[in-house]
Image (cartoon, rainbow, N blue to C red):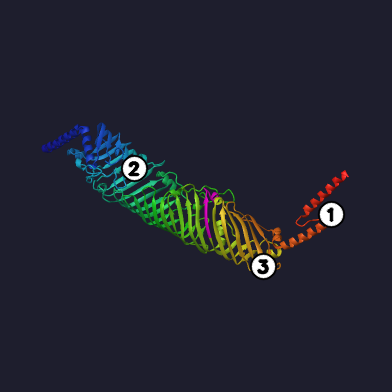
Amino acid sequence: MKWIMRILGLVVLVAVLVVVGVLMLPADKIAQIAGDQLRKVTGRDVTISGDVSMTFWPVLGVTAGGLEVGNASWAKDGAMLSTSNAAIGVDASALLRGEIRITNIEAQSPTIRLESRKDGRASWEFTDATGAAQIETETSPARPAKAVTIQKLKITDATLIYDAEGSDLVSYQGVDLALDWPDANGAADIAAALRPARDKVNIGARIESFGSFLTGTVQPLRAKITAKGGELSLQGRGSLEGAVAGAFALQAGNTATFLAQLGAGAVELPKGLGQSLNVSADLTLTPDRRLALRDLVADLGGNILRGGVDVALNGVPQINAQLNAGALDLRSLTEGGEGGGSSAGPGWPKDRIDASGLAAFNGTIALNANSIDLGALSLGPTRTVLRNDRSRMVFELREVNAYDGKLSGEFVMNNRNGLSVGGKLQALDVQMQPLLTDLADLSRFRGQGSASLSFLGVGQSVDAIMRSLSGEGSLKVGRGAIEGIDLDALLGSFDVEGGTTVFDSLNASYAIKGGVLRNSDLLMLLPNFNAAGAGEINLGAQTLDYTVTPKALRVNGDRGLAVPVRIYGPWADPKIRPDLKAAVDLNFQKEKEAAKAKVEAKVQQKIEKELGVKVEDGQSIEEAVKDGIEDKLKKELLSIFD
């Protein structure tokens, strides 16, 4: 029993001596050793300054008035981490063995500067600095770092600055960061919170074999970014150099809100083109910031795209994509405002078109779709290529089935110096009634034919663009009909109300200037007569003033009978009236001249008889009467002096 008590007493004595020894270790010495440890595992200069004191709870360690961890030698600005208030925890059991092993680091309101370069260098990639010769330089890379033994890292209210070569400088304030890494050979959990905008963005990640990850080895990982409006997740593999591969998912009930919380600013996305998102893909990201998405499925809020995308993320994204879609609704690209046209009344929408999205990317997107609704046009199975270069987007129609025929050509939107739209389009064997109804709300014209159109318009609304249109085109239609007017009946009764005109062919060309389409050579062939047309259609005001002149070919002594019909007013409900005065001028010109000559002869005889005035050859009746009256006045005046 005595021996047991002696052994216990000896143990207590040793414990007391150890505790006293620990308590007597100078805090600045522990801080110096801890700084050396940090320098060895990071390869960076480490400075601990200010007042240094011991802490015993909740961890054994030191607090320091200042801590600074140097940046890579090639970095442009300042230390990688600098803080005026830091705490460094040490392993008590290792301390009893005479070792200083760092277990945790805490920093309040530090400044963290991270930099990366296009050649793959990153300031957060540490190196082994056990000897001065191993410190990283521009021309002499150092060896990979030894295993780091920091178990916990906690940073609160930090200022985070990220400078990626070729991109804008990113700076965040109020960043919280926590690292939980209990086993140097095991996994690490990372949690971060920052506020690029008003609300908090949370980032969580788990990286397996974190020590190997820090030395550049690819490791399994999973990560999630959550913010107001949506979340983004990734599960796969990655390395500290920026190489990532895995299953990617993005869900955003409100994409604009989600992007705003990530610091993207105010973003306006068209309806059906990303206002909400549900995206999944196999993702690959290379250290030089080249992104590849395969097996992509993207629900853009009603429009679903599938395919593959390659994106270069240095500067303005450069996109190359091959996409397939079912029924694609793109009405929001051509209609003003979120809900389409202006509700102020008839006419074109006056809502401002926001074309700023044309500057969001450059590149080429090939699209195959079962159908495309452009608002003004409805297309069937379509194969197109979209090219965008510095806010100039060209929509090339390679194979488009529409209105029972084919469309080809290109449509251009240019927002480099204000918005303009233009293009060259050809239609082959299309049904004119649905095409003209969609383009101009004209439903009276039926027939199958071909047309060509080149056009250019400028303005920030559909109304402004339509009022500025210029261009030219032609129209060729086979057998068809015009509803609301019977030109055949017109020649017999002059009644143009109701009925339908059936024609065998129609040809015309036109020019557009200032939003007004003018035509002077329309020719329509009918079974018993033909019809010519001339006039104008005001595309901006949605009105027309056009005259069609049908001519019966085998009447009026084989001279034909022509009755002009004027069509005028709003094109949705125009007035149709025969021009009888013009009809008389056209059909009875000889009779009018003969009647006029007969009347003039009778008047001349009457004047000669009553006034004694003779009409000379080449002299009008008015001139003869005037001369006769003057002669009589002269004679009367001279008679006064007789």
The dot on residue 553 is 3
Quarter of the image that includes the N terminus: top left
Left or right of residue 101, residue 425 in this image: right
* Residue at disc 3, secondary structure: loop
Q: Mark 1 or mark 3: which is in front?
A: 1
Quarter of the image that includes the C terminus: top right
The residue that label 2 is drawn on is: 163
The dot on residue 229 is none
User: In 3D space, how far apart are the residues under numbered discs 2 and 3 (Cα atoms)?
Assistant: 82 Å
Q: Mark 2 or mark 3: which is in front?
A: 3
Front residue of 510/252: it is: 510
The residue that label 1 is drawn on is: 612
Q: Residue at x 81, y 49 (%)?
A: 630
- Judged from this view, the residue extending furthest toward the left is 3
Residue 264 position in % (x across, y down): 41, 45
Q: Is residue 617 above or below residue 152?
A: below
